[in-house]
Image (cartoon, rainbow, N blue to C red):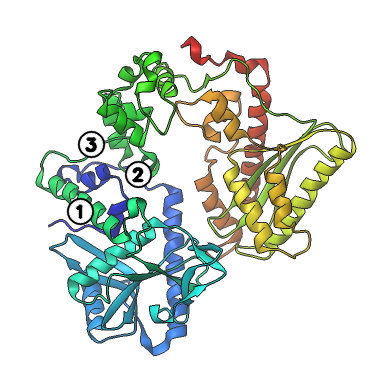
Amino acid sequence: MVLLDAGVVTRCRRRVHLENDPAMREVETAPLDLGVEQRIADATEHRRSVAAQLGELLGESWTEIPRGVPYAERARLTLEAMREGVGHISGAQLPDDADGGRRGAIDLLVRSGNGYVPVLVVRHKVTDPGSGAKVSPIGEPVPEAAAVDSTRKVRPQPRDQLRLVHAVRLLQACGFSAGDRTAGVIGVDADVVVWHDLRSPNWPGGRTALAEYDARFGDRLDVARAAARGDEPLAQPSRITECRGCPWWPTCEAQLRERNDVSLVVRGEDATALRGQGITTVDELAATPLDAAEDLQLTGVRNADAILLAKAWLREMPLVRRVRELDVPRGDVEVDVDMESYADAGAYMWGCWLSGADIGEEQGYRAFVTWDPLPTDDEARSFAEFWSWFTGVRRKAFERGLSFRAYCYNELAENRWMLASAERFAGKPGVPPVSEVKEFIASAEWVDLFAVVRDQFLCPNGKGLKVIAPSAGFSWRDPEAGGENSMRWYRDAVALDGGEQDLSQRERLLTYNEDDVRATYTIRTWMTSQAAHDIPYAEDL
C-alpha cells in the first residue's frame, strides 16, 4: 500500500518514483546536505519551543502527543484526543487515509465547531509589513479569534498552504474536519497565528490551494503507485534546481550524463520544451544552427545562449565571453561588501574590503559583527557601525573629488538585510532611515557583480561566486567554505545549542567572510585585466 506525506506535492516527480520503487531500496543515496540537516534540526527545535509556549498559555485545554512513542500509538492517541474533544492537540499524528493514499502529522489541531482545523508551525516568516493579514494572538490560536491586522500582510508561502490542505484531507478522511476553508500557520516570530482561506482563488489561473493540492497530490500518487507496481515509470530524470540538495542526485546524474541529457545545460521547463521539439541531448542542442535559435521557444534562457551553452559544455569550458570587451563599473575608492545571516533570524556580520585611492582609512578587510545569539538588539549596534563606517568612506571620497563604488555578489541578500535592519531598528543610535538605504541601493554606486557576470559571460556550470571566482584565479582558504556550512559554524560560534561558545568557529567565519569579499574584488579586477580576454568569445564557438 502506498501512503504519501505532504512533502510530495512540492517534491520532484522523479524523486517520488525512486522513493517508491522497490528496485531502488538497496541503492545508496547521497548523505543529507549538512545545511539541510541543520535547518531540519532548527525547525524541530522551533516546533518544540512553540509547543512549550502554547502549553503554558493554553493550560488544561492543551495536550501533547508524545514524540517518542511508535507511529501507530501516536495515531491512536491523536484519534482518542479528537474523540474526547480536546481543545488543542499538539504534535498530532493523524490516522492513515488508506483510500486516499495519505499519511501525515500536523503541529497543532485546534477544536472549531464540531471538528478540528490544522495549524502549522514553521521556522520562517509568514507575514511582512503591510495590511490585510487575518491573524489571532498566539494565546488564542483559534479561527474564531481572528481579525484583520492593519500592520501585516501575508507573505506568500505556497508550500505551507499545500501542507495544510494535506492535513485537511486527512481530517476529512477520519471524520474530524471542521471544513476545508480555514487553516493556520505560526511563523518564526511565534507571536500570532496567520489564518489562510484555502478556498481563495489566489493561485495561478484562479485556482484555490485546495484545487492545486488535489491536482499535484493526485499526480504524485499515480507516479508512486506505478513505481510500487513496477510499471513503466511515469517520471524520468531531468535536472532542476531541487537536484542540488537531493539524496537521489547521484543516481539521476549518472543517468543524465550517460545520455548527455539536454537538462544538464538547460533546466526545468526549458528542457521540457526542447524535448517537445525533438532536442533531447546536449549534442543535438549544440548542433542547432544559431539562425534557427528563435524557433526554440525558451523562457528561462535566451534561445541563442542555450545553443552556445551546449557548445561550451561539450568543450568543458567553465566560462565564455558574451562580449568582446568586458566592462565593470569602477571607482577611485572601492568597497566590496558581504553579509552573513542566520536564516530569518538576522544578519550578524557585515564584512568589507576597502581598496583604491588613499582617503586616510586603512585598506583591506574589516568586519562589523555581533556574537550575541540571533535574534538580538546587538545586531542594531553592528549594523549601525557598518553603515557609519561605510557612509563615512563614501563621504571622504566625495570630499576629495574621488568616485566611489561598492560591490556585492547577488544584491538580493544584502539589500534585504540592509532594508530589514533599517526597518527593525529604526530610531536606534546610528541606524539610518529606510529612505537613506533605498537611495543608496538605487544609486549607480551600488554594483551587483553577479548581474555583471550574468550579462557578460555564459556560465555552463552556474554563476555562483564559488563557481566563477576560480576562473579569476581565486580560491578559498577553508576547503569547506560555503553558505550552508557557515550556518553550522555560526551555531557553534554562539553556542545556539547550549554549552561553550567555540571561538575557533568565530575565526573560521571571519576568514570565510573575508575570502568572500576578496573573491568579488578578484573577479572585478580580473575582468578589467587582459587576462580575462583569454576566456573564449561566444562567436568564436
Secondary structure, mark 3, is loop
Whether 282 is drawn above or below 356: the answer is above
Q: CA distance from mark 2 to mark 1?
A: 22 Å
Which quadrant of the figure has residue 372? Answer: bottom right
Outermost residue, top direction? 540
**In the image, which is nearer the foreground, mark 2 or mark 1?**
1
Q: Earlier in the sequence, mark 3 or mark 2?
A: 3
Q: CA distance from mark 3 to mark 2?
A: 15 Å
CB contact under 8 Å: marks 2 and 1 = no
Q: Where is mark 3, residue-wise?
A: 236
**In the image, which is nearer the foreground, mark 1 or mark 3?**
1
Horizontal arrangement in the rendering, residue 356 relative to residue 321 (left or right): right
Q: Position of residue 116 (x, y in %)?
A: 29, 77
Residue 218: numbered disc: 1
Whether 158 is drawn above or below 319: the answer is below
The answer to whether residue 442 is visible is yes
Residue 246: numbered disc: 2
Which is more toward the observer, 318 or 118? 118
Amino acid type at image mark 3: Gln
Q: Residues within 10 Å of mark 2 (few under 14, many from 20)?
A: some
Q: Residue at x 47, y 81 (%)?
A: 139
